[in-house]
Image: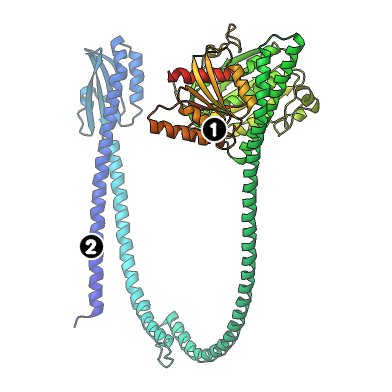
Amino acid sequence: MTNPRSLSRRVTLVQTAVITAVVLLFSTATISWNAYRLTRQLDDRIAQTLKLAETTLSTAVWQLDHDAARDILDAVFMDEAVVFAQVVAGQETVAEKTRPPFSRLNADEVGNPPCCLSRTTVIKKYGEPIGSFNLVVSKAPVRRDILVNAGSTLALALALILILVITQATLHFARKRLIIPLQRLEASATAIAEGNLDIPVDTSPDCELRNLTRAFEDMRESMRHLIKDLQTANAKLEDHRAHLETTVRERTEELEHKNDSLNTALDELRNATLVAERANLAKSRFLSSMSHEIRTPMNAVLGMAEILGETELTPDQTRYVQIIRAAGESLLAILSDIIDLSRIETGSLRLDETRFTLSETVDKAFAIIEPRAGQKSLELVCTLAPDVPNRLTGDPKLLTQVLVHLLGNAVKFTEGGTVRLSVSRAPGRDGGVAVQFSVSDTGPGIPADRLGAIFDSFTQANNSTTREHGGAGLGLTISKRIVHMMGGRIWAESSVGLGSTFHFTAVFGNASDTETLRADLLCRDEDRGAPSDLPPLPASSILMLEDSRYNAFVIETYLKDTPCRLTVAENAEKGLELFRQGGFDLVLMDIQMPGMDGCDATRTIRQWETRQGLPATPVVALTAYVLDSDVKQCLLAGINHHLAKPVKKSALYDIITKFVRSGQ
């Protein structure tokens, strides 16, 4: 039988030999690779030097500039491997430099030693050779680096082999003196752990292991006493477990009670949320109803005032009509501001992402403000930075609303001087175009202690301002909310007696990177037609469904003395009967009517046209419902356009011209 110890010793020797051979082979490979790498690096450096010399020496050789050539050779000699460099132009040596100890040799002798590499490159000017550059590089630094790397690698290999030998010897000693006695002790400990307390423990090992085996023997005796103690402790543990179960049961009942309370609170919260939603819906319905009830009679009031203003009046009568129109428009502006603020607070106001032209949007805002500024002989000025893109994506309606609010405030509080709008590029953001708008005036200014409060709801600079100029103080609040929705901010700067400047920024998408604003796009023409210059109407037959005789009378008066023939139906049923008789180019539809409303009437018209195979007749809603949800409901019913009451004569003419001419 083979001795196990002898077999183990042989396996150990074989392992040591194999690992030693692997280490030596790896060291040899590492030395060879380093030698190859360093040689390649030397070749690359020589090639780079020749390329540099070919580029930089052409001018010096062409002009026979010895100083410039020597400066270039000095730069080449910064590489310690270069021992000789020579610049030759024809038969003349322009520059030459040799590193000691090669300085005693001539040009031919320097390149001959086997320890050096010699290279030559042709120097060209305008594609023609004008000289040559000779370079000799010593291999000594590379060989030195190879020897250093080889020595380091061999030293590391010998150290690894020595560590391996020491490790094998240590393992052999540990196996004989520690592992085998510990295995025997493990067997005894396993038996004791299984409950066999009578198994003998070998106490023959020397040194610390003898103390360990004696400790195990003492432990065997101690375990008999421990078992008895464990039995006593187990009885106490049972008592404690019973007490713990009672405590857990009580805590569970307490948690169930708290859970019931939490569920009750959640139910109350859901009920409160439902009540809030219902209150919000009731608020929206109330605002919609109030808007309708106020706008409907206001349509007649403003319509009659506009018609009356076109008649021959005395100066006093003209002033009375102007007061009626100004008061009505002020009331409508306040109503619109309250509705807009409600839409913002309820989250129903959303930003539209559409392509628009910034110059046209600013132009529309100016067109709205110009009549007010003209009444006070104020100068309106617009300054546009050339780096602002003209074509953007965003919500032009809300941008126009903010501009009108700020420009309107500037005109309202300025009695003389200039109102200026400046548009410039704000610091950019990733993925968007930031634009800054600044509206400045020469008004009375705002005290510093009131600048922070002017953006609050129902707030103006002071009470006397409210009494003098009117307004609900909602314009700046709405503007602030809209600007925040557009990813910007709004602030004001003012000096009492000098005027105020309101700034706001907004972030848009860039629809075109090439087209930018030009200042002449917004030039205000002095000979622009007056607002009363209305376009001629085409001859047409118009059907109007309107239950209010006052509003119907306003439209009839608007279309008096025009080629338009208006037929009025006081309810939807009569209007549908007239429509089926045919011959109408346009339908003006009131939405709220007794019986069938305007949306249902429009659906009935569209269904009848489909059955008859007729083209769709344009239907325009003339309604006091102005919320987004109302407009959307009208469009879904098949209505082509929504025109809010009160209806201005110019707006009605534009709608008739648009739809009647497009139909024809």
Q: Which element type, helix, strand or loop, lies under badge 2?
A: helix
- Residue 91: image x %, image y %? 21, 12
> Which residue bears the numbered disc 2?
18
Residue at 33%, 13% (x, y): give it. Answer: 66
Identify residue type, mark 1.
Ala
Image height of 558 relative to 447, above or below: above
Q: Which mark is residue 498?
A: none
**Local secondary structure at mark 1:** helix
Amino acid type indicated by mark 2 = Val
Which residue of the protein is positioned furthest toward the bottom in this rendering? 198
Using the image, determine if residue 154 lies above or below residue 451. below
Residue 646 in sight: no
Viewer can see residue 222: yes
Which one is nearer the viewer's eye here, 127 or 102?
127
Instruction: Report the label total.
Output: 2
Residue 76, picture quadrant:
top left
Disc 1 or 2, which lies upstream in sequence?
Answer: 2
Q: Quarter holding the N terminus?
A: bottom left
Q: Which disc, if any, is residue 572?
A: 1
Crowding at label 1, few (<14), some or many (≥20) Cα neighbours within 10 Å?
many
Q: Choose between 532 and 582: the one closer to the eye.
A: 582
At a point 24% along the width and 79% down the height, the residue shown is 4
**Left or right: 520 as drawn, with respect to 205:** right
Mark 1 vs mark 2, CA separation in Å: 105 Å
Question: Which of the pair 113/634 is nearer the observer?
Answer: 634
